[in-house]
């Protein structure tokens, strides 16, 4: 009985001490330090430092990549059988897939989609594939000396018509296909259900084969059973490369860094260079106005339209709106209303970054 009483007293003493400690801890003063007080290194400096880090186990990684190269003939055979190839595993697989395409897919046309970008226009991709397939079929018919039963009419630029053209029975040669390489099919620009459905429909086309990579741990949740087994028809390949995500990481800010002027301008320049020349010229007008009117809320949309039309960069308001949509999608331009109620356009960059950006675009 004495032992039991002692145990109960020890338990009560422990519980009492626990609650006393909680009370004392709650009464203590909170720290006055803030996250903003931390010294944050410049992003460009951190990237340059990270690029000088030597890769460990270089010999073993080289041997691993050599083993993957022996699998190239098997991968080509799987594509010819109608399967899609899905590469997964730790490390960037961009170099591996591109080496596979350049070494083993020389007999086929290859189109690359960089899913790690923040914006990908799948409709433009489908249009490019349709044009490529049309030229490919013409060349094959000329080389074989056969005449087509009827000249194929190029489809109207709607996604459904483009996919129908890519899936159509224009050729009985099952080895006539275009290989679409999708780096990071689970990337930020392709994660929405609509994009994945479009890619799944594209993969099921008779003249298309998909070679893709994933890196997100929850990437398989993007697809349902039909998409995996019927449309994409994936064959999963575990190919860890242990390679750094140098190219993929350029478009994402590093943790505990502040973006430098040069790095911010460089990132914006990369995005702008992917747009049309007219879109770049419209952006330059907006940037020059913002530099010359630093105290204003931004450039009124009507003024931008007038200036762009005078220089023949746009032909209508619809054209300008399409350029502005691209700018907003890439987070290059923001809109707000001034005191007069006018809609104004503003580039969310500092004056130094904006000057550097204009220099980069004019080079």
Image (cartoon, helix red, strand yellow):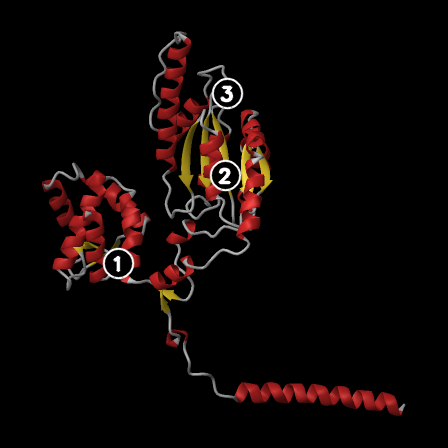
**Picture quadrant where residue 26 is located:** bottom right
**Picture quadrant where residue 336 is located:** bottom left
Q: For the residues carrying marks 1 and 2, which lies nearer the camera in this image?
A: 2
Sequence-first tag of 2 and 3: 3
**Residue marked by disc 3:** 175
Q: For the residues carrying marks 3 and 1, which lies nearer the camera in this image?
A: 3
Dot 2 falls on a residue whose secondary structure is strand
**Picture quadrant where residue 180 is located:** top left
Q: CA distance from mark 1 to mark 2?
A: 34 Å
| Labelled disc at residue 348 | 1
Relative horizontal placement of residue 180, taking residue 332 as reference (left or right): right
Sequence-first tag of 1 and 2: 2
Q: CA distance from mark 2 to mark 3?
A: 20 Å
Residue 202 in percent (x, y) is at: 46, 31
Residue shown at 55%/40% (left/top)?
A: 66
Near mark 1 (Cα within 10 A), the count class, few <14, some 14-19 or many ≥20, is: few
Does residue 307 appear in the picture of this structure? Answer: yes
**Residue marked by disc 2:** 212
């Amino acid at each position: 009985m004495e032992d039991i009483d002692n145990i109960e007293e020890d338990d009560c003493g422990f519980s009492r001490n626990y609650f006393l400690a909680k009370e004392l801890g709650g009464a203590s003063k909170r720290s006055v330090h803030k996250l903003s007080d931390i010294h944050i290194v410049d992003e460009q400096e951190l990237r340059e430092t990270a690029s000088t880090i030597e890769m460990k186990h270089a010999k073993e990684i080289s041997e691993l990549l050599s083993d993957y190269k022996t699998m190239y003939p098997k991968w080509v055979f799987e594509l010819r059988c109608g399967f899609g190839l899905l590469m997964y595993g730790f490390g960037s697989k961009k170099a591996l897939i591109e080496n596979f395409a350049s070494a083993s897919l020389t007999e086929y046309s290859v189109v690359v989609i960089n899913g790690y970008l923040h914006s990908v226009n799948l409709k433009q991709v489908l249009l490019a594939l349709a044009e490529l397939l049309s030229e490919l079929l013409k060349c094959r018919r000329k080389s074989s000396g056969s005449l087509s039963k009827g000249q194929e009419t190029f489809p109207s630029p709607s996604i459904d018509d483009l996919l129908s053209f890519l899936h159509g029975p224009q050729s009985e040669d099952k080895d006539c296909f275009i290989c679409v390489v999708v780096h990071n099919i689970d990337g930020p620009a392709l994660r929405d259900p609509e994009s994945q459905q479009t890619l799944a429909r594209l993969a099921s086309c008779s003249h298309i084969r998909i070679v893709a990579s994933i890196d997100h741990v929850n990437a398989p949740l993007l697809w349902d059973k039909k998409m995996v087994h019927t449309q994409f028809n994936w064959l999963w390949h575990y190919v860890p490369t242990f390679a750094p995500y140098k190219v993929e990481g350029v478009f994402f800010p590093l943790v505990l860094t502040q973006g430098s002027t040069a790095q911010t301008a460089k990132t914006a320049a990369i995005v702008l260079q992917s747009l049309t020349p007219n879109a770049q010229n419209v952006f330059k007008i907006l940037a020059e106005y913002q530099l010359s009117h630093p105290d204003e809320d931004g450039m009124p949309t009507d003024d931008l339209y007038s200036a762009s039309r005078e220089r023949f960069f746009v032909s209508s308001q619809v054209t300008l709106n399409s350029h502005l949509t691209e700018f907003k999608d890439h987070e290059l331009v923001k809109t707000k209303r001034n005191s007069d109620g006018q809609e104004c356009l503003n580039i969310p960059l500092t004056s130094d970054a904006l000057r550097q950006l204009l220099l980069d675009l004019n080079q």
